[in-house]
Image: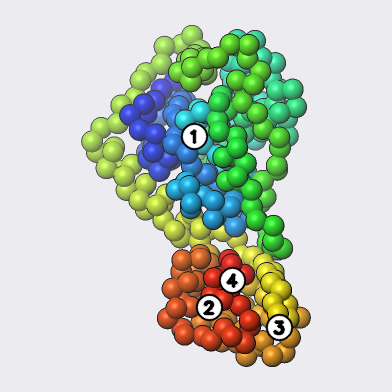
Amino acid sequence: MIYFENSQSSNPFVNLAIEEFMLRHIHSNRPIFHIYVNEPSVIVGRNQNVFEEIDFNYVRKQAIPVLRRLSGGGTVYHDPGNINFSLISPDQNLLNDYASFTKPLIRAMRNLGLTAELRNRSSIFISGKKVSGNAQYATKGRLLSHGTLLLNTDLAQLRSALKPRHQQISSRAVQSIRSSVANLSDFLDEEIALDTLKDQVRREFLGSIPAEEFELSEEDWEVVRQIEYERYHSWEWTIGQSPKFSTVRRIQTAQGEVILDILVEKGTIQSIQSLGSPVKFNRTINRLSKCLTGVRYDSQDITLALQISGIELNSLGISENQLISLIF
């Protein structure tokens, strides 16, 4: 077993880049175990539509970054109250074998006096509450299995960040299974430190066999930084990777109800059509579609495009801010 812990950084962009670096660039016939803690962040699955998973207005206001990981599965929230871990194996036969991967995790919780069980294929529950979510990604004879374990995460912020707005969206994206979550601290008689939990998890994954502690060289760090900026800071990967979708948005005005059908692909607006709105709105909505086609589906980009266009909104009976709220 090879062991690596990045205790120097809680930057989610760095830690996901390290994970990918170890998956693609450390060629070993031994498993690699990685454990880390992130600052508040939202991590969406590879095949998910970010617009169906999170409250963009909330995460932007709270300065919570959104990242997309390599593996599938649902959206998760990270903060200093939970640990994140990954196991990179040269054996792809363990693909979808979450029972084998999570056994050490369940043993670690048992050592704390907790009875945990694997449910829904890849999640760990205690007393009907989800405390851990896990996912996998296979590539070129290598398998990445990773997950998160909640100790004392800010659950109020988790729920706010992962509470998508109520809107009608049609897509083929993988949607998160919304389970009732809890912290391990809710079930413990005494408080434990995050480092204590990390030690328990590390000990169970590494076992009794001596592990080689891995260190990143300066050359390794250069590759990590390249991965970080080319993938995890990339709008095209994080947002543009979202599957094609359409959303129906509506607002009631003094002149009638405005109903828009917005088609978004690769994170950019492809068209805006009127659905059942009064005919008198059609001319303005057609101009709106021409103005915003090709614009990123983001409130800031939409605002800038509208300001440049000079479209007169009086015919719709709404303000610019109302229009932006309607579209996004």
According to the picture, the residue beneath numbered tag 2 turns out to be 293
The reply to whether callout 3 and callout 2 are in contact (CB within 8 Å) is: no
Residue at the (54%, 55%) spot, across then down = 57
The nearer-to-camera label among 3 and 1 is 3
Q: Quadrant of the C terminus?
A: bottom right
Among numbered discs 3 and 2, the one appearing first in the sequence: 3
Per the model, the C-alpha gap separating discs 3 and 4 is: 14 Å
The nearer-to-camera label among 2 and 1 is 1
Residue 285 visible from this viewpoint: yes
According to the picture, the residue beneath numbered tag 4 turns out to be 322
The reply to whether callout 3 and callout 1 are in contact (CB within 8 Å) is: no
Per the model, the C-alpha gap separating discs 3 and 1 is: 46 Å
Of 172 and 61, nearer the camera is 61
Residue 28: x and y in percent read 40, 29
Query: How dense is the environment of label 2, judged by Cα within 10 Å: few (below 14), some, or many (20 and up)?
Result: some
Q: Which mark is residue 79?
A: 1
* 310, above or below 230, in the image: below
Per the model, the C-alpha gap separating discs 2 and 4 is: 19 Å
Per the model, the C-alpha gap separating discs 2 and 1 is: 36 Å
The amino acid beneath tag 3 is Gln
Residue 75 visible from this viewpoint: no
The reply to whether callout 3 and callout 4 are in contact (CB within 8 Å) is: no
The amino acid beneath tag 4 is Gln
Residue at the (70%, 43%) spot, across then down = 177
Among numbered discs 3 and 4, the one appearing first in the sequence: 3
The amino acid beneath tag 1 is Asp
The amino acid beneath tag 2 is Thr
Residue 304: x and y in percent read 44, 73
